[in-house]
Image: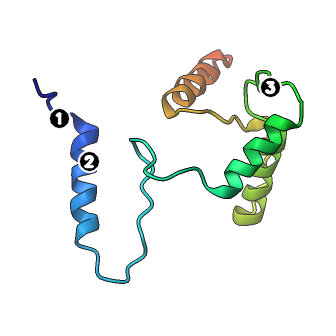
Amino acid sequence: GLVPPFRVMDVITKANQRAATLPPGAEKILRMEVGQPGTGLPEGARLAAAAALNAGDPLGYTEGLGRDFLRARIAAHYQDWYGVTLSPSRIAVMVRADRSVVWSIAQVLAQPRRRA
């Protein structure tokens, strides 16, 4: 039988309807919410992946909170764009939003309670 639609499908349907009403020449919408890519890997990404695989470096697990260079670059972005000084040690890079929410709640609950 058919799988009944669920919230994400309703959101996608509405997004598609809205995209269909954009005027000619409007900026193209880049869809990144669900599904599979409809095109091959971009040439630059393919070459970078091949170079990384051919470098001979071990492909072990990354750091639990994200790669140091990425966390440092995110901190630099906050400084450049928002004028906010942020230590890379305060940044956590997560793959999925649900994991980051759970991690954030765990960090708050791990703090000692303070009285107001």
The alpha-carbon separation of the residues under discs 2 and 3 comes to 37 Å
- Residue 74: give x, y in percent of width and height: 74, 50
**Label 1 sits on what residue type?**
Pro
Numbered disc in front, either 2 or 3: 3
Determine the secondary structure under disc 3: loop
Q: Which of the two marks, 3 or 1, is nearer to us in this view?
A: 3
Classify residue 29 by image quadrant.
bottom left
Q: How is the image coloured?
A: rainbow
* Res. 11 mark: 2
Question: Is residue 87 at all visible to an observer of this figure?
Answer: no
Left or right: where 110 falls relative to 21: right
Q: Secondary structure at mark 1?
A: loop
Q: Nearer the viewer, residue 98 or 55?
A: 55
The residue indicated by pointer 3 is: 59
Reply above or below: 69 against 80. Answer: above
Distance CA(mark 2)–CA(mark 1): 10 Å
Q: Are the residues at dot 3 and dot 1 in contact (C-beta closer than 8 Å)?
A: no
Q: Residue at x 78, y 26 (%)?
A: 63
How many marks the image carries: the answer is 3
Residue at x 74%, y 58% (from the top left corner): 77
- Residue furthest to the right: 56
Q: Earlier in the sequence, mark 2 or mark 1?
A: 1
Residue 33 shown left or right of residue 42 in the figure: left
Q: Is residue 49 above or below residue 44?
A: above
Residue 22 horizontal/vertical position (percent): 28, 75
Q: Position of residue 72 (x, y in %)?
A: 82, 46
Q: Which residue is mark 1?
A: 5
| Mark 2: secondary structure | helix
Query: Can residue 46 be seen from the camera position used here?
Result: yes
Between the residue at mark 3 and the residue at mark 1, the CA separation in whole angstroms equals 39 Å
Q: Is residue 95 left or right of residue 55?
A: left
